[in-house]
Every structure is written in structure tokens, then in C-alpha cells.
Amino acid sequence: MHKKRLAFNDKINFLDVLLADDRVTKDVDEATLREMLDPARYVGSCVQMADDVIKKWRK
């Protein structure tokens, strides 16, 4: 299951889901994740941004 879907379905903060995954945190630190998830840094494109990150990560 995609991380964003897991967070949504289980009502868990997306950042907490990402931080709990060693596959994510081995490459991205908490400060970077917080910056990436800061709503002030994007306007209405969070779903596309998350999909883009996941696609790049899977490569």
C-alpha cells in the first residue's frame, strides 16, 4: 500500500509514516522530510508531488 494511502486510511500523520520506514530515512533526514511536507512550500499539488517522489524512490 502506498505510504500516503496508509496515512490517510489509518489516520496517521504522513510524516510519521515516512519516518517509521527505514527505506525512506536511510536516504532522507527528518528535517528534509519536514521541509518537503511543509504546505507553505506548495500550492495544491501535494498529491502529485508525493507521487513524483515515490516514483523516483522506486527507481
Image: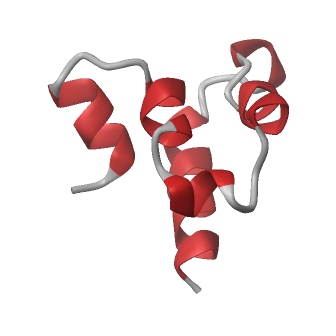
Vertical order, 23 against 35 (above or below): below
- In terms of depth relative to the viewer, which is nearer, 12 or 21? 21
Vertical order, 10 against 32 (above or below): above
Q: Which quadrant, please, contains the C terminus?
A: bottom right
State how the image is colored.
Answer: secondary structure
How far across and down, in percent of the image, does residue 10 sit? 17, 24
Residue drawn at x 60%, y 25% is 44
Vertical order, 26 against 6 (above or below): below
How far across and down, in percent of the image, does residue 23 sit? 54, 63
Q: Which quadrant, please, contains the N terminus?
A: bottom left
Q: Is residue 20 left or right of residue 41?
A: left
Give the residue furthest to the left: 9
- In terms of depth relative to the viewer, which is nearer, 40 or 6? 6
Q: How many marks?
A: 0
- In terms of depth relative to the viewer, which is nearer, 58 or 49? 58
How far across and down, in percent of the image, does residue 51 sit? 50, 56
Residue drawn at x 37%, y 40% is 4
For residue 11, what is the image quadrant?
top left
Residue drawn at x 36%, y 46% is 3
Q: Is residue 41 left or right of residue 34?
A: right
Residue drawn at x 74%, y 25% is 34
How far across and down, in percent of the image, does residue 32 sit? 83, 37
Q: Is residue 13 left or right of residue 40?
A: left
Q: Is residue 24 left or right of residue 20?
A: right
